[in-house]
Image (cartoon, grey):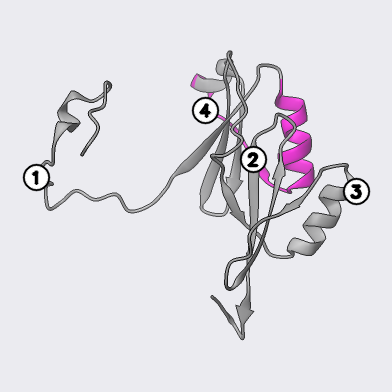
């Protein structure tokens, strides 16, 4: 049985989709951080993970937070006044050189945990300075092609 959303009254049942409409990808993922956490976020996401910080649009700078480039996608760190860490929901970053990244994180005092192994990939998780879960995934490479 479908649950009715209190935010979207029109979502009560199946709707006919226009042939021209489709969702084809992700633009960004947002993680919440506490107010004033930008310096610690830069240390973790910028220095340790090596993500490139992007300039936020001027219209959004007063909100605080940071934006990062992750390949063709973006990671947005948004300030939440009643911040609670996401301990289960998380982004999973595709990594090349996972062993080196694990070494860098551990040298900085981060605890890196192994997760249940899945065929064709090595994966670990770490928490950011605010307690948010972050997964790091490296796919096994067969010849020139990733699995």
**Residue placed under numbered mark 1 in the picture:** 16
Q: Which quadrant holds the C terminus? A: bottom right
Q: CA distance from mark 3 to mark 2?
A: 19 Å
Residue in view at x 66 percent, y 16 percent: 35
Q: Position of residue 47 (x, y in %)?
A: 79, 43
| Numbered mark located on residue 133 in the image | 2
Q: Is residue 12 left or right of residue 34?
A: left
Percent of width and height locating residue 111: 81, 45
Circle 2 or circle 4, nearest the eye: 2
Q: Earlier in the sequence, mark 2 or mark 4?
A: 4
Q: Nearer the viewer, mark 3 or mark 2?
A: 2
Quadrant assignment, res 38 = top right
Circle 4 packing at 10 Å, graded few (<14), some (14-19), many (20+), is: few
Q: Which residues are magenta?
A: 37-59
**Element at badge 2?**
strand
Q: Give the SS element for disc 3.
A: helix
What is the spatial separation of the Cα atoms under label 4 and label 3, in whole angstroms? 34 Å
- The location of residue 25, given as percent across then percent down, is 38, 52
Residue depicted at 82% across the width and 48% down the height: 105
Residue beneath disc 4: 57
| Residue 99 percent across, percent down from the top left | 79, 63
* Label 2: few (<14), some (14–19) or many (≥20) C-alpha neighbours in 10 Å: some
> Do tag 1 and tag 3 residues touch (Cβ < 8 Å)?
no
In the figure, 107 relative to 84: above or below? Answer: below
What residue is disc 3 on? 107
């Amino acid at each position: 049985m479908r649950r009715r959303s209190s935010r979207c009254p029109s979502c009560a049942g199946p709707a006919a989709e226009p042939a021209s409409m489709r969702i084809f990808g992700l633009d960004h993922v947002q993680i919440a951080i506490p107010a004033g956490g930008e310096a610690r976020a830069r240390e973790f996401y910028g220095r340790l993970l090596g993500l490139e910080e992007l300039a936020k649009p001027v219209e959004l700078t007063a909100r605080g937070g940071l934006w990062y480039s992750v390949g063709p996608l973006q990671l947005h760190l948004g300030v939440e006044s009643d911040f609670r860490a996401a301990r289960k929901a998380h982004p999973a970053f595709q990594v090349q050189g996972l062993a080196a990244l694990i070494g860098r994180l551990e040298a900085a005092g981060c605890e890196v945990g192994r997760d249940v192994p899945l065929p064709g990939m090595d994966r670990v998780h770490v928490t950011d300075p605010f307690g948010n879960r972050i997964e790091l995934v490296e796919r096994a490479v067969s010849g020139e092609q990733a699995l």
